[in-house]
Image (cartoon, rainbow, N blue to C red):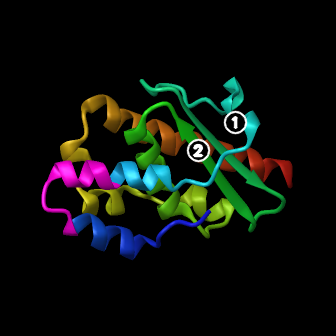
Amino acid sequence: MNLLDKNTLLKNFLRCENWEEKYLYIITLGNNLSPAPNNIHSSKFLVPGCQSKTWIMVLTDNHTNVQLYGDSNSSIVKGIIAIIFIIYQGLTLKEIIKLDVSPFIKKLNLHQNLTFTRTQGLGDIIRTLRKQAICNMTKYH
């Protein structure tokens, strides 16, 4: 995954002059997601509760080498996935499970300008990612 770091994301996001620019930036982030494996579009990786078809996949061969993949039929949601992945990139499974992303999300003010269903979807994506991280942890214990 070739994503920005959190500080660059925040700096770029805050440079956007209005929400139209921010939405376009979010869409651009989604377009830069790494291609997901072909089997991601199965019900096993479908995010429950999302209005859009959204899939999240957490892969690991141990607790430290974590790979995140995501896809959606919505460009905005793909961008939201990219933001979430930027927050979690480089973390171990244990760190992913424990990390509270809400302070960083608040800095971006996403909750103020996303629709209610998109905000709910954001939470659903985070819960699904954590759930998969927990499942991966149990595979290695």
Task: Specify the quadrant that holds the N terminus.
Answer: bottom right
Q: Which one is in front, 72 or 51? A: 72
Q: Is residue 34 above or below residue 41?
A: below
Residue type highlighted by circle 1 = Ile
**Residue 96 on the magenta segment:** no
Q: Which one is in front, 125 or 42? A: 42
Quadrant in the rendering for residue 14: bottom left
Region in magenta: 15-25
Q: Which residue is mark 2?
A: 70
In contact (CB < 8 Å): disc 1 and disc 2: yes
Q: Residue furthest left?
A: 17
- Disc 1 to disc 2, how far (Cα)? 8 Å
Q: Which one is in front, 141 or 81? A: 81
Q: Which residue is mark 1?
A: 40
Q: Which one is in front, 87 or 97? A: 87
Task: Specify the quadrant that holds the C terminus.
Answer: bottom right
Q: Earlier in the sequence, mark 1 or mark 2?
A: 1
Q: What secondary structure characterizes most of the magenta part?
A: helix
Left or right of 2 on screen, residue 59: right
The residue lying at 20 percent from left, 44 percent from top is 113
Q: Position of residue 104 (x, y in %)?
A: 35, 63
